[in-house]
């Protein structure tokens, strides 16, 4: 019992340490966002400002283009999620339900493709977009993100689809459903946790990605929030650290809300393969 207690204490300390590591940047960003310019570079630095103010949030929302960048990011996320699901759901379903000669090597190939740095793919798509005359397009940027994320999402969904009994679809087809009908009425409702997880991962990536938008978009009116905040720092000559921190903290909130609302689906989908059979 003493050994078990020690293990629990050590594990709790490790978890607390990891929690602090991950939460401190968010806390510091919020702390910077409620400072006035004089307190931004105060010495010695303080974890919490002497005179906290939320005037920076009003400035960011009403006097900068960051709200427009937020709208661009929402459009980017929406299109990216739709494209990824259109590509990944049929692909994962096919890999899960049908056997063919190269099916055993497709999953490793998908994972290897996912290891390719995004910067390499973005340069290739940049050249394609200039050649095709669709540079500075949020739609093409969404297609680029979908192409990059679809292999991982396909692998993720395939692992989850494998846990759904085939007998349910077979019973539906015996009762008169076509395969597409069984897929729509039986399979997809059961696959909701996996699909929700795919939506979360794709949304967070599309919302927070910097490399692809930075290379594919140079029209400031079409910047997503990541590039927009960076561009704001470059366009100003006065101290804007507190305003940048405000925009960055606001940027985190939508992703955090989506994850908190759907986190139970993430856990269910990621552990599905472990309990198969």
Image (tube, helix red, strand yellow):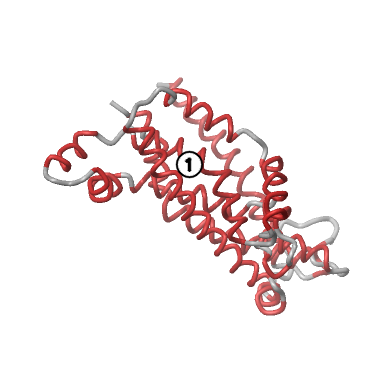
Q: How many marks?
A: 1
The residue drawn where x is 24% and y is 43% is 179
| Residue 28 seen anywhere in this rendered image of the structure | no
Q: Quadrant of residue 248?
A: bottom right
Residue 185 percent location from the top left of the image: 23, 50
Left or right, 199 with reference to 253:
left
The residue drawn where x is 85% and y is 58% is 43
221 above or below 136? below
Farthest residue, direction front: 132
Residue bearing the label numbered 1: 153
Left or right, 40 with reference to 195:
right
Q: Which residue is nearer to you in this view: 227 or 132?
A: 132
Residue 11 percent location from the top left of the image: 51, 31
Farthest residue, direction right: 237
Farthest residue, direction left: 175
Q: Quadrant of the N terminus?
A: top left
Q: Residues within 10 Å of mark 1 (few under 14, many from 20)?
A: many
Residue 35 percent location from the top left of the image: 74, 67
The residue drawn where x is 55% and y is 44% is 149
């Amino acid at each position: 019992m003493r050994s078990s207690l020690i293990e629990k204490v050590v594990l709790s300390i490790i978890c607390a340490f990891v929690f602090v590591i991950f939460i401190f940047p968010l806390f510091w960003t919020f702390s910077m966002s409620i400072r006035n310019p004089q307190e931004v570079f105060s010495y010695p630095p303080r974890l919490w400002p002497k005179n906290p103010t939320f005037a920076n949030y009003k400035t960011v929302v009403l006097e900068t283009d960051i709200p427009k960048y937020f709208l661009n990011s929402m459009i980017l996320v929406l299109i990216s999620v739709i494209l990824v699901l259109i590509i990944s759901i049929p692909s994962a379903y096919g890999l899960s339900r049908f056997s063919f000669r190269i099916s055993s090597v497709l999953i490793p190939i998908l994972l290897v493709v996912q290891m390719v740095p995004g910067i390499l793919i973005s340069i290739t798509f940049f050249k394609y977009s200039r050649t095709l005359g669709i540079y500075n397009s949020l739609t093409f940027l969404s297609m680029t993100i979908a192409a990059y994320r679809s292999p991982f999402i396909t692998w993720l969904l395939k692992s989850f689809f494998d846990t759904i009994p085939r007998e349910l679809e077979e019973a539906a087809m015996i009762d008169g459903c076509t395969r597409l009908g069984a897929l729509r009425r039986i399979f997809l409702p059961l696959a909701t946790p996996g699909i929700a997880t795919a939506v979360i991962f794709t949304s967070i990536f599309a919302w927070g990605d910097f490399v692809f938008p930075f290379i594919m978009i140079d029209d400031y009116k079409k910047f997503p929030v990541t590039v927009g905040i960076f561009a704001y720092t470059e366009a100003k000559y006065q101290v804007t650290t507190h305003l940048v921190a405000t925009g960055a903290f606001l940027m985190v909130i939508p992703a955090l809300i989506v994850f908190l609302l759907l986190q139970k689906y993430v856990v269910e989908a990621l552990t599905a393969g472990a309990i198969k059979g």
